[in-house]
Image: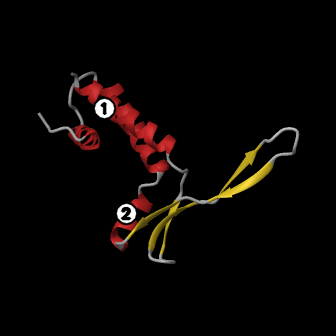
Amino acid sequence: MSDVTILRRAASALRERAGNATPGPWERSTHYGYKIVSQTLTVGHVNPPEPIRPARLRAVIESTNAANAEYIAMMHPPVALALADWLDDEAARGLGRPDNVAAYAVARALLREACE
């Protein structure tokens, strides 16, 4: 497998997981313990022939550790999408060579693959 493939696989995984997650930005809250709270979303529900009724949703990820909560909140989906763009840019420039060691280290860490 080429180094470029590793970068593209990691970028794809980031995009998929960020796309499936509750949109950010996320914040840390100490209300009732440490929690990561996403922005409040308004989602329209259509139940014909009745009108659209917005539902208020709020995603919460609980953590018992303040440092974990701060870190998780910092790594909200827009961060993952920016990292995915960077990995794709490096793949486009790399032409199969590990020119950017940091990009390959990030990609392998995301994919949980050992360095060769």
Which of 60 and 76 lies nearest the eye of the viewer?
60
Quarter of the image for residue 70 reads bottom left
Residue marked by disc 1? 7
User: Which of the image's four quarters has the N terminus?
Assistant: top left
Quarter of the image for residue 57 reads bottom right
Residue furthest out toward the left? 116
> Earlier along the polypeptide chain: callout 1 or callout 2?
1
- x, y (%) of residue 106? 27, 43
**Circle count:** 2
Vertical arrangement, residue 64 with respect to residue 87, above or below = below
Residue marked by disc 2? 71
Label 1 CA crowd tier, 10 Å (few <14, some 14–19, many 20+): many
Disc 2 element: helix
Quarter of the image for residue 4 reads top left
Q: Is residue 82 left or right of residue 47?
A: left
Label 2 CA crowd tier, 10 Å (few <14, some 14–19, many 20+): few
What residue is at 24 percent from the left and 44 percent from the top?
109
Q: Is residue 6 left or right of residue 30?
A: left
Q: Please, what is the three-letter code of the amino acid marked with disc 2?
A: Tyr
Marker disc for residue 36: none
Vertical arrangement, residue 1 with respect to residue 54, above or below = above
User: Which of the image's four quarters has the C terminus?
Assistant: top left
Q: Are marks 1 and 2 in contact (CB under 8 Å)?
A: no
Determine the CA span between mark 1 and mark 2.
23 Å
Colour scheme employed for the rendering of this structure: secondary structure
Q: Is residue 72 left or right of residue 115?
A: right
Q: Please, what is the three-letter code of the amino acid marked with disc 1?
A: Leu
- x, y (%) of residue 26? 51, 60
What residue is at 20 percent from the left and 31 percent from the top?
98
Which of 83 and 65 lies nearest the eye of the viewer?
65
Q: Nearer the viewer, mark 1 or mark 2?
A: 2
What residue is at 84 percent from the left and 38 percent from the top?
48
